[in-house]
Image: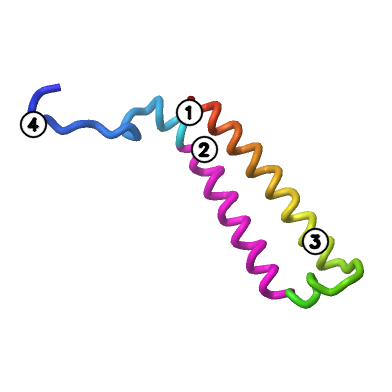
Amino acid sequence: MKEGAIENTLIDYQLHQKRLVPLLAQALANFFTGEKIREFWTKHPVDILQPGSSQVQEINHALTTYLKAKAGDDCQKALLEVR
């Protein structure tokens, strides 16, 4: 590279875009899903924390369990991809 020349960033290369942009999209989808779950939690704290099984508890449990598994799997795949 010549002195004073502008260096291309990694994301400027099309090959890296094809590999990294889908991973970024997955990460953002997981983040925003987590935010929606947090909003759900703050709207229904009494229903979620009350003893006994309720529909709100079941929904919250299903959503958090799915997101935890999905985000973990996505992280593992992303680490293998960027290696």
Separation (CA) of disc 4 from disc 2: 33 Å
Dot 2 lies on which element?
Answer: helix
Query: Quarter of the image holding residue 48?
Result: bottom right
Which stretch is magenta?
21-44
**Residue type highlighted by circle 4:** Gly
Q: How is the image coloured?
A: rainbow
Which residue is labeled 2 in the image? Answer: 23
Query: Quarter of the image holding residue 10?
Result: top left
Dot 1 lies on which element?
Answer: helix
Q: Is residue 28 left or right of residue 17?
A: right
Which residue is labeled 4 in the image? Answer: 4
Separation (CA) of disc 1 from disc 4: 30 Å
Tell me whether circle 1 and circle 2 mark residues in contact (CB < 8 Å).
yes
In the image, residue 52 sits, relative to residue 17, either above or below, namely below
Say whether disc 1 or disc 4 marks the residue closer to the N-terminus. Answer: 4
Q: Residue at coordinates 55% horizontally, 27% vertically from top-left?
A: 80
Label annotation for residue 48: none
Which residue is labeled 1 in the image? Answer: 82
